[in-house]
Amino acid sequence: MPAPQNRYRLSRLTRSRPSYTSTPRTLPSNSSSIAIAVEERGGRGGVNKDSLKDMEAKSAAHGKVHGNYEYLPHTADIQLHSWGPTLNDTLSSLCIAMFGYMTDLTYINLSSEQQITFKADNLNNLIFKILDEWLVHFHTTGFICKEMVTQVKEEGGGWEVECVGKGENFDIEKHTQGTEVKAITYSNLQIHQKTDKVDIYVIIDI
Amino acid sequence: MSSFAEKTGDCGAPSTTPAVSTVRPRIVRTYEEHMKYIKKLTPNSWQILPGFVPGMRVPGIFYVNERLEQLMLSELQQSCDGTGIGGFIPACSQIANVAALPGIVKSSIAMPDVHSGYGFSIGNVAAFDMNDKDAIVSPGGVGFDINCGVRLLRTNLFEKDIEGVKENLAQSLFDHIPVGVGSKGVIPTSPSDLDSALELGMDWSLREGYAWAEDKEHVEEYGRMLQADPRKVSKRAKKRGLPQLGTLGAGNHYCEIQIVDEVHDQKAANRMGIGARGQVVVMIHSGSRGLGHQVATDSLVEMERAMARDGIVVNDRQLACAKIHSTEGQNYLAAMSAAANFAWVNRSAMTFLARQTFAKMFSSTPDDLDMHVVYDVSHNIAKVEQHVVDDQLRTLLVHRKGATRAFPPHHPLIPVDYQFTGQPVLIGGTMGTCSYVLAGTQKGMDETFGSTCHGAGRAQSRAKSRRQLSYTDVLDNLNKKGISIRVASPKLVMEEAPESYKDVTEVVNTCHDAGISKKVVKLRPVAVVKG
């Protein structure tokens, strides 16, 4: 692409713009490896008007729900609502709901298994932590869960949690990109426990 | 307020007290009862009187014009109609809840783009007295995306120069700047690099060759907060930040190629070097990525303990806070500053990548393309500033969450280039609409701690947008307007459609009419890269 001819026609603009002292420009020492990395990404991905067909095919599969959960409207963020017969099941669905927002779980294989364990002070803290632990786990390892088994145990005023997730590592070539989850919030966090049904509501920041 | 103080005195309980006791119960009222506490002050502003929620120390104020007030009040009405299950706290109540925090000064202020957030509403400005030993700092008042902000680069190209290569340019930008979930940056970073970046901010970018010396001049705080302490940033946060340097993120973050569409203030626009209609500029909207999100999350957990210990009572659990001068408060400020530095380094990295993109495309150098930083604003941050309150100069910790600093002409903290125009304020619009450059005014300094709006602000929930809009319509619409787009997620196309947002022009006009900032330039996008 040749340089446009009228580039220096901007004398009026140039005169009135703030004056600077010119300092030497040194390129970063790793600029060649950056260029290679950019080259590798070249022309790949990204939804544009030409890839509409592709998107349509993908979105047909999308929206399939992989557990007992739904996404409720919230002005800026999203509220997760999950339910189940027991607290363990509801917590598992809640985590899957979060992962389902980050990528389309239809494309996730159940090829590996990973575990997290932690302690929580109270039930609200437990709900917050289980999502936060998995979110950090995703950001450090790239692991996406599609199925999950959760075991919680109340002990001495606190809670002990063991959570096993099945899924695979996120691969930008294979999987669709959903929305990034920034953080879990305590905002309007609710848990409704009945004898046969447990409901949890959590707002996540996106 | 005195009875409230007595109550908090009783709560000076040991740290073993469960955290629940520090949250006041919510008042249940009908919409009509609520409206007794809300008064219209001027055509562009409303006041929330003390008593709207328990413990209010100062009134709340929100700036909306006739069209935007509908959204605000209908949100309040909806919250009264609801059963209380699910649902969320309306922005009005959130503004009032903030007015009940210890140490707050003057009023809890909300900008026209206000909408319900967590703890603080988005668009909320609140200042706390640094000399009041009970005054607090709240991570909720900064937001999860610490130092999220907007940067504007100018070029000396005109619209017709990029006409033929627009699609290629969009693709090339998309190749250079990774976006969306699970994306990794193209700039290799080691843990020790990250520590230096957190400490040095843009000085690190300059040292490593990602930034130009004059870039720093045109960034708030010169791109480096001196209180930053990388040791206060948790390992988890650093782990999240390490692969993400030079990535844009997702959600409402974007990188756009824009055209100067209307010039409202020729003199100020010339001063900023964007005074010619048709001129091409690049806008980058991003933040501190996973690192900042984790810093905020970590601090919330820590502060909950501090609240129970110090007997701080709040109206909403998400308003977790700590006394400014407590260990937790100081730790948060040090970690927040480090995350802020990371955000500047990140925007500088993307500036570098955008410059490379243009240089390659036009076989030129960024210098010859005049790709200088016009300005870089932060719209999620807490800063120590001096303001005149009740005719007294006071040192305040100003929280701006979804609000932009807009200092007036002659203010010592704005760069010498903009001493006569006022600080440039960059307002990112929604995908496919328009963005604005504003300038700070003295009235804004007097009324809103030198703050103004930050963007359009959501009007419709993401879930609703997804149900109601089809991405083909949204993309067709953009196509008709001649806007090239690269998006990582098809879902996002609907969620981020202009229909989901308030009209940015209404928001900006409200700020202009209220006098808290003035319009300088309107920008129109021609290429969008998004998560």
Image: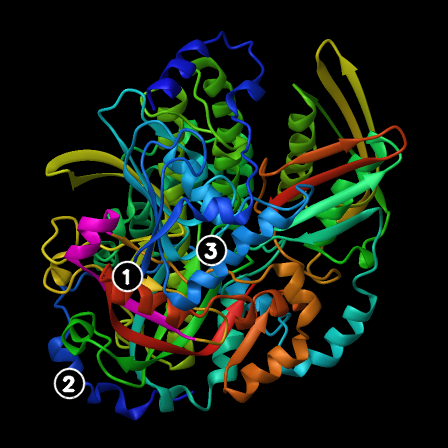
- For residue B247, say whether it is visible: no
Whole-Å distance between the Cαs marked 1 and 2? 26 Å
Give the magenta part as a residue range.
B434-450
In the image, residue A131 sits, relative to residue A3, either above or below, namely above
* Residue A17 x, y percent position in the rendering: 15, 73
Measured as percent of width and height from the top left, residue B164 is found at: 46, 91
Q: Magenta stretch: residue B302 in it?
A: no
Measure the C-alpha gap from mark 2 to mark 3: 34 Å
Residue ID for mark 1: B425
Q: Is residue B425 above or below residue A84?
A: below
Q: Residues within 10 Å of mark 3 (few under 14, many from 20)?
A: many
Task: Please state which amino acid type lies under the numbered disc 3.
Answer: Gly
Looking at the picture, which amino acid does disc 2 mark?
Ser
| Quarter in which the C terminus of chain B is drawn | bottom right
Quarter of the rendering containing residue B200:
top left
Q: Which residue is mark 2?
A: A11
Q: Residue at x 76, y 33 (%)?
A: A192
Name which residue type carries label 1.
Val
Whether residue B136 is visible: yes
Q: Secondary structure at mark 2?
A: helix
Label 2: chain letter:
A
Quadrant location of the N terminus of chain B? Answer: top left
What is the distance, in whole Å, between disc 3 and disc 1 at their CAs?
23 Å
Residue B178 as seen in the image, left or right of residue B139: right
Among the two numbered marks 3 and 1 on one chain, the one whose residue lies closer to the N terminus: 3
> In front: mark 1 or mark 2?
1
The residue labelled by disc 3 is: B246
Crowding around mark 1 (Cα neighbors within 10 Å: few <14, some 14 to 19, many 20+) is many
Q: Position of residue B457 (x, y in %)?
A: 46, 60
Residue shown at the point (40%, 86%) measured from the top left? B162
Callouts 1 and 2 on one subunit: no
